[in-house]
Image (cartoon, grey):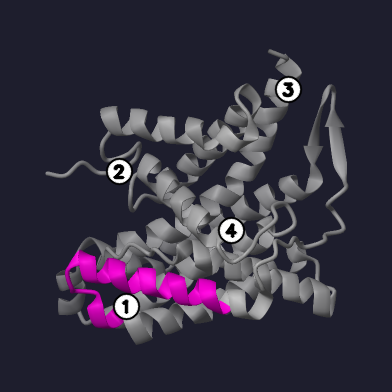
């Protein structure tokens, strides 16, 4: 095996892992606060991609400059979905929550099909052809920028949750909903903000990856599966676990493409999932059930 090719795979995997981490952070935040599994997560990310596409084609905004607008738009969508739909079944059995979020996913996918059509597309970025050489291996500048922005957004979310009053309120509601209600916390508002932030994270991730990977409306399913893979490996509800899990899954898929072939890259990541579940059923950073 060519060591240069392996090194290239590691670099590409780590850089793309930042985007995986950001999309998983949004999913694990929603679950950690509300205990709702967002099966529409991948489809929300696809809409982030299409918003970046519209900004690039109609307004000339590079996706690495317009990701904040995509995140803001998905934040509003998340607020709408939570207030209008999820809030009505947040205390319902999990099967009802699953059916609702699957319905939301189907609606988002089919609306995207009607608006944009089924053909794959990709956003053109000024950084697409830029590379940095490090000896025998190279670094895609667009992946490097996407990694840097994703890490910065993840750190900003951590600071928000652990260093601001609203962030502490969100964590308190996640730890003990009844206790938060007793001290006068508006839990419905907390849930809405948490769901909106989770959607904003995946919207930003979609914009950052829109110039790297081709996408189409059905892409949401594979993105949701990848997100679940990441958060299960890292531990449901753990931000650190989501970040580390994103890096591990991305590196595993990148090396899988090197050692096997690109069409079988998921074999490595799901093998990693099985191994971790065998020895750490709660995930690497998840809390064991008492």
Magenta: main secondary structure equals helix
Disc 4 secondary structure class: helix
Relative to 140, say whether 258 is above or below: above
Residue 183 place in picture, x, y as percent: 19, 78
Q: Is residue 187 magenta?
A: no
Left or right: 25 in relation to 137 = left
Where does the magenta region start and end? 87-111
Relative to 80, say whether 164 is above or below: above
User: Residue 287 or 207: which is nearer the viewer?
Assistant: 207
Does the image show residue 55? yes
Q: Residues within 10 Å of mark 4 (few under 14, many from 20)?
A: some
Relative to 210, say whether 258 is above or below: above
Query: Which residue is under mark 1?
Result: 86
User: Residue 176 or 4: which is nearer the viewer?
Assistant: 4
Where residue 286 is drawn, which disc sits there?
2
Query: Which residue is under mark 3?
Result: 5
The disc, 4 or 3, on the residue closer to the chain's N-terminal end is 3
Disc 4 + disc 1, Cβ < 8 Å: no
The disc, 1 or 3, on the residue closer to the chain's N-terminal end is 3
The span from disc 1 to disc 3 (Cα, nearest Å) is: 46 Å
The span from disc 2 to disc 1 (Cα, nearest Å) is: 24 Å
Residue shown at 23% from the left, 61% from the top: 175
Left or right: 213 in relation to 272 = right
Tally of numbered tags: 4
Q: Quadrant of the C terminus?
A: top left
Q: Residues within 10 Å of mark 1 (few under 14, many from 20)?
A: many
Query: Which residue is under mark 4?
Result: 153
């Amino acid at each position: 095996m060519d060591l240069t090719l392996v090194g290239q795979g590691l670099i590409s995997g780590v850089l793309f892992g930042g985007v995986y981490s950001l999309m998983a952070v949004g999913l694990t935040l929603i679950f950690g606060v509300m205990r709702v599994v967002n099966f529409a997560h991948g489809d929300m990310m696809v809409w982030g991609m299409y918003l970046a596409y519209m900004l690039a084609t109609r307004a000339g905004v590079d996706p690495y400059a317009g990701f904040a607008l995509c995140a803001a738009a998905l934040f509003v969508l998340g607020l709408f979905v939570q207030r209008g739909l999820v809030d009505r079944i947040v205390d319902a059995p999990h099967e009802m929550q699953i059916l609702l979020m699957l319905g939301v996913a189907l609606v988002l996918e089919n609306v995207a099909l009607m608006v944009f059509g089924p053909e794959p597309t990709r956003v053109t970025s000024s950084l697409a052809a830029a590379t940095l050489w490090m000896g025998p291996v190279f670094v895609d500048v667009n992946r490097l920028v996407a990694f840097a922005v994703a890490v910065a957004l993840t750190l900003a979310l951590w600071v928000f949750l652990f260093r601001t009053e609203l962030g502490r309120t969100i964590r308190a509601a996640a730890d003990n909903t009844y206790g938060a209600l007793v001290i006068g916390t508006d839990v419905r508002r907390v849930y809405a903000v948490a769901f909106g932030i989770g959607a904003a994270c995946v919207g930003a991730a979609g914009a950052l990856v829109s110039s790297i990977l081709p996408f189409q409306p059905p892409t949401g399913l594979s993105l949701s599966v990848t997100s679940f893979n990441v958060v299960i490996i890292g531990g449901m509800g753990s931000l650190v676990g989501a970040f580390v899990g994103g890096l591990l899954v991305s590196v595993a898929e990148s090396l899988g493409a090197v050692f096997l072939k690109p069409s079988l890259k998921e074999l490595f990541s799901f093998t990693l999932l099985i191994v971790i579940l065998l020895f750490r059923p709660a995930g690497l950073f998840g809390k064991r059930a008492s």
